[in-house]
Amino acid sequence: MRNIKIVVVTVILALSMVACQFTYNAPSMAQGAAQSLPTLAAPTPMTISVSAVNPNLEADQDRLVRLYDAVSPGVVLIQQIGEIGSGLGSGFVFNSDGYVVTNYHVVEGATDLEVDFPSGFKTRGIVKAIDLDSDLAVIKVEAPADQLFPLTLGDSDQTKVGQTVVAIGNPFGLNGTMTMGIISAKGRTMDSLRQTEDGSYFSTGDILQTDASINPGNSGGPLLNLNGEVVGLNRSIRTTGTNSDGDPVNSGIGFAVSVNILKRVVPVLIEQGSYDYPYLGISTPPGGDLSLLEREELGLTTTSGAYLIEVLAGSPADKAGLVGGHAATRIRGLLGGGDLIIAVDGRPVRVFGDLMSYIMTNKSPGDSIVVRVIRNNEEKEFALTLGKRP
């Protein structure tokens, strides 16, 4: 019994201590007055302003929203009629005359195209002209003026690596999708879609690399800076993975044709139906560069420049006196004695892409250029007249 009393007393004390932490004026039972229990105030909801966390974040967010609202009406979905899912891609309105720009591979083999506008308006499109060298196509559509929102073209030469860009398109048919990333690199080269006489492919240059998410269906859509200006036309991705349908999966390596190529090529495609690219008639190593070991084997004293492994007979480069590799070395497949181009018209050439970007965005067949080369450890200059690709 003594133990039970101790427990009871302990509980009473504990309850008394708890009660002391929540004090209020207890109603007087003797007076018989009716008093209500205390009302606990509802907690004030906590609201966090985006600008309170980061003053610039809300402004950046609003800028992207405005950009999308301004640009998306000019981005269209393109697909081949009767071939749902085949040739599905994007495009954008180039001018108020109803011309739409996209990739050639989006419309390849097409006889009938459907062009869908963000407003819900749909119309047929006719392929006006194609360009396999830069993978471009121009489509003509008949649409009311209030459906045509031409996009503003920027200057891809002014873009910087690290600059924020956005892509708008229709990945996997998901209309009007916007993604964001940066310019990862400039002046990349890729194989064009046009073959040479020996079965290899011509090169295309002035390609922008971006990590903005680009997937199947984004092809042909615009890559834009934060001013809403087109700086490139999304073309392809590099990936080693595919999804369950076998479609390539974005890996953060995307490529876009520079807008300066578009500004040079598309008006000519509209007016003349084709565009002639300048032609040198040279070949460089795969990837356009040499390893340090290869440069040492060739006896080159500089680690930059575009090495000529071949100069095609009768080409502009051949007529100007440029020389390709012709002497055996200890490295299989590598021929020594070729010229190393280090400058064109006074502009440094670090890699083959520098040479291609300059020529493709500034020169036409019939124009002259001056190239500086290193031959037998001596610098020489050669003037040559560019031809047109055969």
Image (cartoon, grey):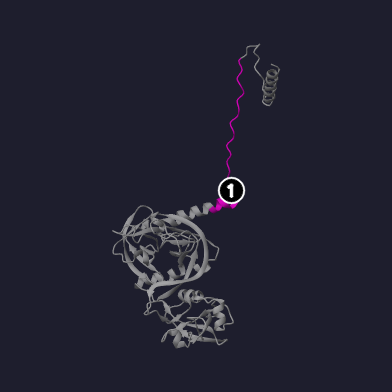
Can you give x and y, in whole percent of width and height, for residue 30 in the image? 66, 11
Work out which quarter of the rendered image holds the N terminus and state it.
Answer: top right
Q: Within the image, what quadrant is residue 73 found in?
A: bottom left
The structure residue drawn at horizontal position 57% and vertical position 77%, both measured from the top left corner, is 292
Q: Nearer the viewer, residue 171 or 247?
A: 247
- Quadrant in the rendering for residue 249: bottom left
Type of amino acid under label 1:
Ser
Q: Which residues are magenta?
A: 34-60
Q: Which residue is mark 1?
A: 51
Number of numbered discs visible in the structure rendering: 1
Question: Which residue is at 52% across, 64% downward?
Answer: 183
Q: Nearer the viewer, residue 65 or 253?
A: 253
Residue 133 lies in magenta, yes or no? Answer: no
Residue drawn at the location 52% of the way across and 61% of the way down: 182
Task: Kindly tell me whether residue 226 is visible in this rendering.
Answer: no
Residue 247 makes an appearance in the image = yes
Say if 309 sits above or below 165 in the image: below
Q: Where is residue 258 drawn, in percent x and y?
A: 46, 68
Classify mark 1: residues with Cα within 10 Å, few (<14), some (14-19) or many (20+): few
Above or below for 21 versus 287: above
Q: Position of residue 139 (x, y in %)?
A: 34, 64
Magenta-drawn stretch contains 59: yes
Image location (x, y in percent) of residue 48? 58, 43
